Image (spheres, rainbow, N blue to C red):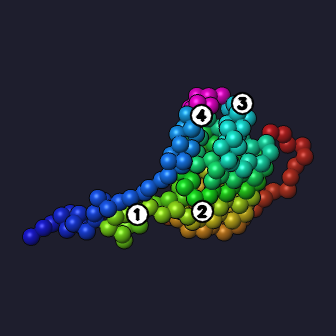
Amino acid sequence: MPNDADSSASIVDLSRYSHRRSWLYLAKRLAWHCMQVPFWNGMPKRMSFLRVALLRLFGATIGKRCLVCAGVRVWEPWNLVMGDYSVLGTGAEIYNLAQITIGSNAVVSQESFLCTSSHDYSDPALRLFSLPITIHDGVWIAARVFIGPGVSIARGAVIGAGAVVVRDMPSMTVCAGNPCRPIKPRIMRAANPGLRD
C-alpha cells in the first residue's frame, strides 16, 4: 500500500505545468536584467536617482523624490506604481507579475517581499496565478515582511517586522504576526516643527 507521500505525488503532475511568455516579453525581461547593475548590493544609496530613472525608462510610474535603495529587485518595472516621497528599502523584493501600487509617503523596509503570484495548489499542474497588491498612502511595511497576492494595506497602517500578510489590513492600525492581524490603533503625535531628520 503506498504511503502518504506516494499518494500525494500521484495527484500532482508537473509535466503539465505551462507558463508561456511571448518572445517580446522575454526580450524585455532580458533587457531589464542587463540594466540592473545600479541595483546591486553595496551600491551607494545616493545612486537612487539612477535606479529611479531606469525603472521609469522600463515603464514604472514613480512620483517625485522617491528613494530606491541598493539591492532592490523589481521583477517587472512596467507593473510598479509609486507615489511621491515613497521608499523601497535595501534588499526589498518586488515580484510583480501583476501590478504593485505603493502610495505616497509609504515605506517598504529592508528585505520585505511583495509577491503578486502563487500557484493554485488545487490544480494538479500547479498553475501560476497573479493578483495585484496595493499599499496605500502613509503605510510602513517594516523589515522582512511578506505580502501575498491580492492584499491591500489601507492608509496609514503599520505592518510589524517579519509579518506574513495574506489578507487586507485596516487603516491606521498596527498589525503584526504570522498570519498578520490587527494589534492596536496607530496613534500619531502632533507634528513638532522643532524636530529635524
Name the image quarter holding residue 114: bottom right
**Percent coordinates x, y for residue 191 in the rendering:** 86, 52
The residue tagged 3 is 46
Q: Looking at the image, is mark 1 or mark 4 earlier in the sequence?
A: 4
Q: Which mark is residue 35?
A: 4
Earlier-in-chain disc, 1 versus 2: 1
Magenta stretch: dominant SS?
A: loop
Q: CA distance from mark 1 to mark 4?
A: 30 Å
Q: Which amino acid, mark 2?
A: Pro
**Magenta span covers which residues?**
35-44
- Between disc 2 and disc 3, the foreground one is 2
**Based on the displayed image, in which of its 4 quarters is residue 39 positioned?**
top right
Q: Give x and y (percent) for residue 60.
A: 68, 48
**Residue 195: x %, y % from top left:** 85, 43
Task: Determine the CA span between mark 3 and mark 4.
Answer: 18 Å
- Residue shown at the point (59%, 55%) measured from the top left: 160
Residue 132 is tagged as: 2
What amino acid is labelled 3 in the image? Arg
| Outermost residue to the left | 1
Nearer to me, 141 or 86: 86
Q: Secondary structure at mark 1?
A: loop
- The numbered mark, 4 or 2, whose residue comes first in the sequence reads 4
* First-in-chain label (3 vs 4): 4
